[in-house]
Amino acid sequence: MLIDYLHDHPNILKDKTVIELGSGTGILGIICKKNSNCRVILTDYDDLSLEHMEIDCEKNNIDCEIVKLDRFSPVITEINIINNLYNNKSTLQLLAGDVLYKKNYWNLFLQLN
């Protein structure tokens, strides 16, 4: 599983900015932050999920950015990363652990090049 791999290989995220798409509870991003101390941005479209992420980060004493991101019309500029990546020489790592469980969402990802 992705979470196990990231837990066992923390160096692959060192000095990266991690954006987790469809974070839900944020557990994957929280593991990344705890193990790699990288910059983590948790995203979801659901307000209840965003509230859960805030609570989970607070309970785990983790500092992650939490951003509402609409999966049907995502606007990556809502996440203030471009200048930060350039200035800090960081690279971007997208994580999408649980976002492709419904076939009707697959086309959104298959169109990405």
Image (cartoon, rainbow, N blue to C red):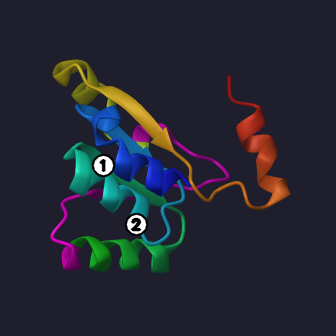
- Vertical arrangement, residue 5 with respect to residue 91, above or below: below
Q: Please name the residue that numbered disc 2 is placed on.
A: 27
Percent x, y for residue 91?
33, 25
Q: Secondary structure at mark 1?
A: strand
Q: Secondary structure at mark 2?
A: helix
Q: Residue at x 79, y 47 (%)?
A: 106
Q: Is residue 67 left or right of residue 48?
A: left
Q: Residues within 10 Å of mark 2 (few under 14, many from 20)?
A: some
List the single residue furthest toward the front. 8
Percent x, y for residue 50?
41, 71
Amino acid of disc 2: Ile
Residue 68 in sight from this viewpoint: no
Q: Which of the 4 image quarters holds residue 19?
A: top left
2 or 1: mark nearer the eye: 2
| Sequence-earlier tag: 2 or 1 | 2
Percent x, y for residue 44?
50, 62
User: In this view of the protein, which residue sits in the foreground, 12 or 89?
Assistant: 12
Q: Residue at x 21, y 79 (%)?
A: 59
**Image quadrant for the C terminus?**
top right
Q: Which of the 4 image quarters holds residue 51?
A: bottom left
Q: Please name the residue that numbered disc 1 is placed on.
A: 40
Q: Are marks 2 and 1 in contact (CB under 8 Å)?
A: no
Look at the image and give the residue range highlighted in magenta. Answer: 58-77
